[in-house]
Image (spheres, helix red, strand yellow):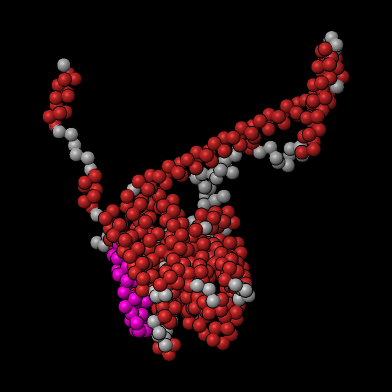
Amino acid sequence: MEIKKSPDGGWGWVIVLVSFFTQFLCYGSPVAVGVLYVEWLDAFGEGKGKTAWVGSLASGVGLLASPVCSLCVSSFGARPVTIFSGFMVAGGLMLSGFAPNIYFLYFSYGIVVGLGCGLLYTATVTITCQYFDSRRGLALGLISTGSSVGVFIYAALQKLLIEFYGLDGCLLIVGALALNILACGSLMRPLKSSECPLPEKTAVENVPERYSIYNGKEKNLEENINILEKCRGSEETYKSTLASGDCKQESLLHKNPTTIAHTKEAETYKKKVAEQTYFCKQLAKRKWQLYKNYCGETVALFKNKVFSALFIAIFLLDIGGFPPLLLMEDVARSSNVKEEELIMPLISIIGIMTAVGKLLLGILADFKWINTLYLYIATLILMGLALCAIPFAKSYVTLAILSGILGFLTGNWSIFPYVTTKTVGIEKLAHAYGILMFFAGLGNSLGPPIVGWIYDWTQTYDIAFYFSGFWVLLGGFILLLAALPHWEICNKQLPKPAPTTFLYKVASNV
């Protein structure tokens, strides 16, 4: 393998464009699932908690499977994974149009579509990072707005398609639109290889040639077995001649040069098998050592109190902050807001304001005089307060304003990598970010069903959103306490008194 230099432009802008449309097409329906959620409630007659599992799985499975998604992209490349995942997303959406019950939707929409979206997100981010270096932040910011624009358009589009073609026809058409991901994936060509060799070889390439016994020049399996059998026969003959006192071994060997050749081949084969066995043992030991190092690094990360607080905050944020994106349309219906008053779907407002929030918060994070960690904490606290204010909103205007505020604050995802980098350092970013994304996916999966179950129990969303706001506020304040500078001062050990050191030196000299 060879180094691939980032061109920071050229075909890279085509990669940005197709990655934008890939995220637009794959995340449009799953993130704007609130429109479908209301229809599924009427179609299947299940409880809100059980129905909410569909949308929560679609959002959470991709994050939960992020290690698998990264492995697939590293092994097969961005283009094959994008094309395969495009089939997954389109097929899952079309299958959902034929769902006989809510449990079928768990598989077709929640798992298949969710896993496809996770693969596509990893593929688009990976290939964009390969094509850009100095402009990487701009490129990633542009492609990340694809999902937000997708929410804005798909919320209104799905509502319109349901009116004309029904729920089943809507899912079939949206699935057909997702097939355009295949065209986007075909344009994701890998970078051309440069002439510079890699500084280090991969584990497979580091294997010495003498360990590679299964190559074209070696004997096949049947020939090796025959060699061993002949060797075993020659050994038995030799033993029998010794037992009978026959001392004509040398003449026998001279008369049978074939036996000598077979014996040498058998010894060579045995030697290579032994070398291969030793190599496999060493490789297994190395893998075990890497696993131990990974566990040790994970423990070291959690010893960092700010990282531990960030882990709790992101988990609580996704439990409490994700449900409005899924349930806001049903909240408007439960508040007796008339259809005529719904000038624009509330999910569309959340989507477009999320794009604005990602852009503006990302710009603010670049200012040196702004502490990115405190900026992130401020978004958490404000989001918790906005969630607690939803029960007091009884009209479309107030719900639209709160939806816009929540959408803008949800844009804090754009500064989350900055916060993680500042907390653990750039060398541990990949490890820490993977752990945090796993628990973010877990929170995404659990949040909407919990809020739905609370509604089923109380028959009102008031307590449910108080619950959501409380957990987001709790996560924000935990992170704030961990990030305060006076904790570092309190934890510093005081230096030993000078007289004690002086007396110890005098005593040692005597």
Q: Position of residue 315 (x, y in %)?
A: 40, 59
Residue at the image position 35 percent from the left and 46 percent from the top: 303
| Looking at the image, residue 135 lies above or below residue 388 | above
Residue at the image position 61 percent from the left and 76 percent from the top: 97
Q: How many marks?
A: 0
Res 377 visible: yes
Q: Nearer the viewer, residue 228 or 476?
A: 476
| Looking at the image, residue 488 lies above or below residue 348 | above
Q: Position of residue 346 (x, y in %)?
A: 41, 79
* Quadrant the C terminus occupies: top left
Q: Residue furthest right?
A: 255
Residue at the image position 79 percent from the left and 26 percent from the top: 231
Magenta range: 377-403
| Looking at the image, residue 330 lies above or below residue 315 | below
Q: Quadrant of residue 456?
A: bottom left
| Looking at the image, residue 18 lies above or below residue 242 | below
Residue at the image position 38 percent from the left and 70 percent from the top: 464
Q: Nearer the viewer, residue 26 or 142?
A: 26
Q: Residue furthest left?
A: 499
Q: Nearer the viewer, residue 353 or 251?
A: 353
Q: Is residue 32 magenta?
A: no
Q: Position of residue 500 (x, y in %)?
A: 15, 28
Q: Position of residue 316 (x, y in %)?
A: 38, 61
Q: Is residue 380 magenta?
A: yes
Q: Main secondary structure of the magenta part?
A: helix
Q: Residue furthest bottom?
A: 340
Q: Quadrant of residue 405?
A: bottom left
Res 142 visible: no
